[in-house]
Amino acid sequence: MSQARIAISADVARAQISKHLYGHFAEHLGRCIYGGFWVGEDSDLPHVDGIRADVVEALRNLEVPNLRWPGGCFADEYHWRDGIGPREQRPTMVNSHWGDVVEDNSFGTHEFMRLCELLGAAPYVNGNLGSGTVREMGEWLEYLTRSDDSPMARLRRENGRDEPWPVPFWGLGNEAWGCGGNMRPQAYADEARRYATFCKNHGDNKVARIAAGGSDDDLSWTRALMEAVACVDCQASPESPIFQGVSFHYYTYASQGINTESATEFSTSDYLRTMVRATGIESAIRAHVAVMDSYDPEGKVDLVCDEWGTWWLPEPGTNPGFLHQQNTLRDALVAGVHFDAFHAHARRLRMANIAQTVNVLQAMLLTGDDGSMVLTPTYHVFEMNKGHQDGTSVDASILEAPSLDVDGHALRALSASASTKDGQLLISLSHLDPDQEMEVTLDVRGAGVTGATGRVLAASSIAAHNTPQTPDAVAPRDLDVTVDQRILRVTMPPHSFATVSVALDHA
């Protein structure tokens, strides 16, 4: 059994962990919308206004803070007027990015906003900058958020919605370096400034405009967008800065790249290489933050990671364009180390969105047309970690932990983060060693400890996953916590994720 030791300074606050770091993403891709969220009002499955009821119930348990829609790549070929009005009269389109299938637009603006209401999630609407127009995007925001007798507000009322919706987040296109237009950074930055100018605040709705940045640690996009924010030669905007957020995307795989390796059949070496890639999210965040700080030391513009997660080969027998993949304990640990990095950089990183919520890539839920629904291991990490939302990140220093040699790279076998909220300390631990148990000593400083409980997500195999036949193959169970004044000890199984909840006494 290996040993690790962590000092947790409950009185050393870092930053508030925005709940929006636990955001989700639902694209018109495969069975995420159709067959995932949307079953239609004529479905025999239990639903609310055509939205699958058990999916809503499961996601409400996660306290989903925001939901990004309609893409992704789909956003930059989506024209919102095709998705309003009577469903039987809506035009169809070809979803050229994802399966080359015909989209019937039966799930559109009103359906999405109803979904957000049912989930209690804030809408993050991604506008079409790639193939749309400035007017089209501006009018969509007016349609959604304006309350008076404007043309778009009247059109919304004609379609059955009197009051406007709150829309706090707005995306200015997606992946402009690729499917969103194959643009160069400066060209997109100029376009994003133009589009942002006409995405106006209507009434009491204040929208955060999020510019689409680069992938991984490509800083050229972040630099170009921050130069656009700081544009000294530009006419001063009536609302400054011109963007309130700059995004980047970060996907995790083993070694060959995205969409090349099985989700369930992999070696220990593949697993370890995956963990190296997953832990690399922190250095990528740090690099983006350094660029943003150099232009915006006051932190007026947020960093947003609005696509992250694992990307494996689709399951055999499924449409390869639908990106339907299984979800194992390996995926859960990827989520665990990502959240530790998010918490560590919560000062500047204010929102993140896992790709995607249902049936696509690193999903929370896998559903079947027969009414089956599976909670994935990643779902359980989100549920176990939800107490961090809007908590205060506190210092969790790993004083001792073994390292694993992965192709000459030293991978620390333990990842951790902690936060305080309402008199409770929540500690998250990701144990990455595939073979050994680990005894973890938690030294809580700066406050007394009056009690502690633990939960662990583990299985005999790293590739363990849940199916309709074995829905609890990977599910949380109680974890024993030994308490000796302010010293806590837990024993973690190999390749496991755990949380420890500690009642604090600040007297």
Image (spheres, grey):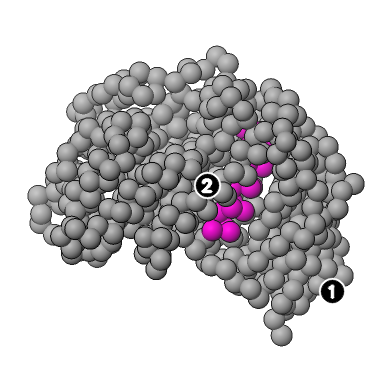
x then y, percent, for residue 364? 56, 39
Task: Tell me what residue is drawn at x 37 percent, y 50 percent.
Answer: 223
Quadrant location of residue 406? top right
Count neighbours of disc 1 (C-alpha within 10 A) and say few if under 14, some if 14 to 19, many if 20 or more.
few
334 part of magenta stretch:
yes
> Which is more toward the observer, 438 or 501?
438
Residue receiving disc 1: 485
- Report if residue 213 is visible in the image: no
x then y, percent, for residue 232? 23, 60
Name the kind of residue labelled 2 in the image: Ala
Name the kind of residue labelled 1 in the image: Gln
Point out the stretch of residues depicted in magenta: 325-345
Is disc 2 placed on a helix, strand or loop?
A: helix
Quadrant location of residue 261? top right
> Which is more toward the observer, 40 or 354?
354
Q: Earlier in the sequence, mark 1 or mark 2?
A: 2
Residue sitting at the far top? 317
- Separation (CA) of disc 1 from disc 2: 38 Å
Task: Tell me what residue is drawn at x 69 percent, y 81 percent.
Answer: 506
- Report if residue 284 is visible in the image: yes
Residue receiving disc 2: 284
